[in-house]
Amino acid sequence: MTPGETTLDEDFSRLDVDGRDIAMRALAGATPGLFWLGGFKSDMTGTKAEHLARWAADHGRANVRFDYSGHGTSGGAFEDGTISRWLEEAVAVFDHKTQGDQVVIGSSMGGWIALLLARLLAKRGDRRLKGLVLVAPAPDFTEDLMWAGFPPEVRATIESTGRFEKPSAYSDSPYVITRALIEDGRRHLLLGAPFAVGCPVRILQGAHDEDVPWQHAMRLVSCLAEDDVVFSLIKDGDHRLSRPEDLERLTDAVAELA
């Protein structure tokens, strides 16, 4: 199956978000619906996103997924992306495409976006969020997992040229890390103090995750002191958590909250 194709009976549409063309897929069904937030440079046809869409279809649930700008079938350049932009797109799709109660599922960077979305919804008094399911959540990754680990010469390159091409374990093309991404990420840091999202949170984390160490996810648990949080450490799990047994854990967590 090529990117953008699916056999599910989904509505494919596009949404303009401040001039950015955002591609979305929506499946009609009962609430609580599922709202998917993908990871850094991933798209809405990935293994976990497809699995959840099929689970939603099998259980008569509404499901919404989309591609951030610069990802998948959405418009724009990846290099222009920032946490602020991708959060703005997530909020716009959530507002435009979902109805009724929702369970938000975020993978890696999508976990950070999910937490920011939850905080924004709580601030404006929107009580539709019934739970968060976070897979290898990576809040603050631009600062803690990128910038803090870059050697001095890489930091100097980013500061002087505005970009660094970081080799990727998942693609032949490198990740372009921009100064704008790093600086904007500092506006959205979460892990420095306790905060509440006001709904149950379920976290799935691989012990062998080389991209988001399990200790990083545990920092998030300590910050969510007021919320109902269950942290599941998968001893032989990696960052993707896309094996059949991992996907079963994912849908079990979603089913518990939905």
Image (cartoon, rainbow, N blue to C red):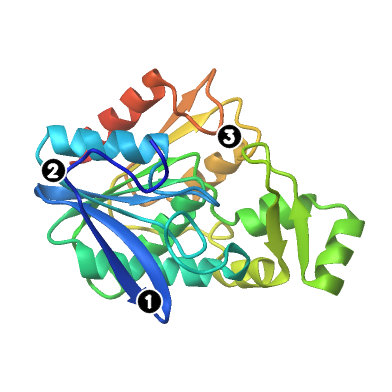
What residue does disc 1 label? 17
Q: Position of residue 89 (x, y in %)?
A: 39, 69
Q: Residue furthest right?
A: 153
What residue does disc 2 label? 61
User: Residue at 38% across / 58% down in the picture?
Assistant: 196
In the image, what residue type sits under mark 2? Arg
Front residue of 103/216: it is: 103
Mark 2–mark 1 Cα distance, whole angstroms, equals 26 Å
What residue does disc 3 label? 214
Front residue of 252/36: it is: 36
Q: Are marks 3 and 1 in contact (CB under 8 Å)?
A: no
User: Residue at 40% across / 48% down in the picture?
Assistant: 106
Closer to the chain start, of discs 3 and 1, is 1
Judge from the rendering whether residue 85 lies leftward or rightward of residue 168; answer left or right: left
Closer to the chain start, of discs 2 and 3, is 2
Give the crowd class for mark 3: few <14, some 14-19, many >=20 residues within 10 Å. many
Quadrant of res 152? bottom right
Q: Are marks 2 and 3 in contact (CB under 8 Å)?
A: no
Quadrant of res 251? top left
Indicate whether 217 appears above or below 145. above
Q: Nearer the viewer, mark 3 or mark 1?
A: 1
Q: Nearer the viewer, mark 2 or mark 3?
A: 2
Q: Position of residue 113 (x, y in %)?
A: 44, 58
Closer to the chain start, of discs 2 and 1, is 1
Q: Secondary structure at mark 2?
A: strand
In the image, what residue type sits under mark 1? Val
Mark 2–mark 3 Cα distance, whole angstroms, equals 31 Å
Mark 3–mark 1 Cα distance, whole angstroms, equals 34 Å
User: Residue at 81% across / 66% down in the picture?
Assistant: 158
Q: Secondary structure at mark 1?
A: strand
In the image, what residue type sits under mark 3? Trp
Quadrant of res 25? bottom left
